[in-house]
Image: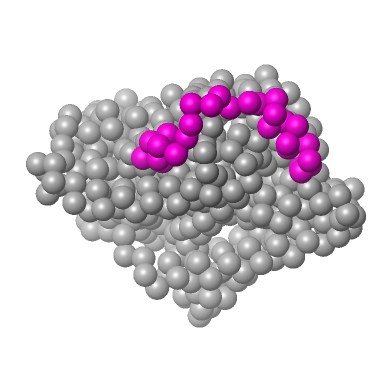
Amino acid sequence: MTPLILFSFVIAYFAILLVVAWYTSRNANNDSFFIGNRNSNWMLVAFGMVGTSLSGVTFVSVPGTVGAGGFAYFQVVIGYVIGYFIVAYVLLPLYYRLNLTSIYNYLQRRFGYTSYKTGALFFIISRTIGATARLYLVINVLQIFILNKMGVPFAVTTAVILLMILLYTFEGGVKTIVFTDTLQTTFMLLGLVICIVYIMNGMHLSFSDTIQSLNAKGYTRIFNEDVKSGGFWMKQILGGAFITIAMTGLDQEMMQKNISVKTLKGSQKNMITLSFLQAIVVFMFLVMGGLLYLYATSKGITTKGDDLFPTIALNYLPTAVSIIFIIGLISALFPSADGAITALTSSFCIDILGIKRNAELTEAKRKKTRRTVHLVFTFIFFVCVMIFKVINNKSIIGIILDVAGYTYGPLLGLFAFGIISRRTVRNHSLVPVICILSPILCYILKTNSAQWFNGYQIGIELLILNGLLTYLGLLAVSSSQRYDAAANEIADSEHPR
């Protein structure tokens, strides 16, 4: 199949998204953009968030990990499920009780404005790096297998894709994304299932035969029992749980969709449904990865890692399957980028610029500010993707987990201290210092852990360590005076959201 035909399907798919965006953004206002008017259907949110939480990293990188690590990634997924329950029954009740538009308003009420701004800035840094890493992975696949053959430069590909995302999120925001993510998750899963079925049929394997063949190759092994290894099962499960708490429960992008659901009960149903759907889908991606390696062995293909799935799908499978793969890939791309840009716009407007606190701003001025910020973040995404193009030389999934460990750790420590402890921080100006020092200390420990701790390697538990150091730092600068929620509510009323 020619690259031009494949690219035409990308354009057709985008046209469908524009139609959905036009329909859902009619009569949209700022509340539609930020929280979907708190009227989202929990079932749509749950299903659509599967695509957001998995992204192109799962679509490309997770199958590629099977060759070296088998199904070990599923250890992390077990932790994810545990983490979703904690988010549903600890964090969501807090957000609904306080009627938050930005979840970082909690930090303002608990610690004051300095902590509030600090938390929001850490989210902005974290989500910008993580989302652009995911975006780069998928754009790079499209570039290598389609656009290079058409003579289109990488920078132009990136700009056009970001322009597409900008067009269908510009007005509707969360209200639009709830529907487009549902559509995109459907196409992503359809692509996955069809690819699995085709390869199984092509190799004359039933599902049970597939599992037996994968088991014979050692691909189905899940649990790593080496205590010193970064992939030790207990560390992976605990790390997965805390990654979900931090990257979902303390992430404005993910929570923005959840708190757009009308009721707390509906939002909790969404979260629990998402946890099990995600586990099933990731298991399917791991099976897909095993099948790809079996297929590669049978055909003498030596490609491994992130390039394996696209290489086989676009060069060795029939035209129809190649088209389905491309649609599935871009369906994994858009949810991870559109929601991120929207959430970053929301957080910057609400948390940093304070457009909801400024009573002098008219709705029209708020809308103009929000549009300007949305454009700026789109440009920032372009710059970051270009940087990844220059410097990236490792698996994107590793980059994302490392970034999460360093940047979400302070958020984890802040929220944990606020919820668990009733102590009061004596000097709020020290909070940003603690949140900066903790990742620095973690970097030093991670770099030297094998040498200092008899071969022990810090892996996915970096996030927990970072959060713990932040918590202990806050404890050190706090007093035994109990946090007065009522007094903070009065103080907060002087600075309306």
Kindly indicate the quadrant of the structure image that contains residue 484. Answer: top right
Residue 475 belongs to magenta span: yes
* 342 up-or-down from 179: above or below: below
Between residues 79 and 192, which one lies in front from this camera angle? 79
Q: Residue at x 49, y 42 (%)?
A: 411
How was the colour assigned to the protein in this rendering? one colour
Image quarter in which the C terminus is found: top right
Q: Residue at x 43, y 47 (%)?
A: 434
Kindly indicate the quadrant of the structure image that contains residue 269. Answer: top right
* 414 up-or-down from 29: above or below: above
The reply, left or right, for residue 98 in relation to residue 439 is: right
Residue 97, horizontal then vertical, whole percent: 70, 24
Between residues 130 and 408, which one lies in front from this camera angle? 408
Between residues 30 and 165, which one lies in front from this camera angle? 30
Can I make out residue 221 in this image? no
Residue 208, horizontal then vertical, whole percent: 32, 25
Residue 87, horizontal then vertical, whole percent: 53, 27
Can I make out residue 83 in this image? yes
How many numbered marks appear? Answer: 0
Q: Residue furthest left?
A: 454
Residue 490 belongs to magenta span: yes
Q: Residue at x 44, y 24 (%)?
A: 82
Residue 146, horizontal then vertical, whole percent: 49, 68
Q: Which residues are magenta?
A: 469-497
Q: Residue at x 48, y 48 (%)?
A: 430
The reply, left or right, for residue 158 in relation to residue 296 is: right
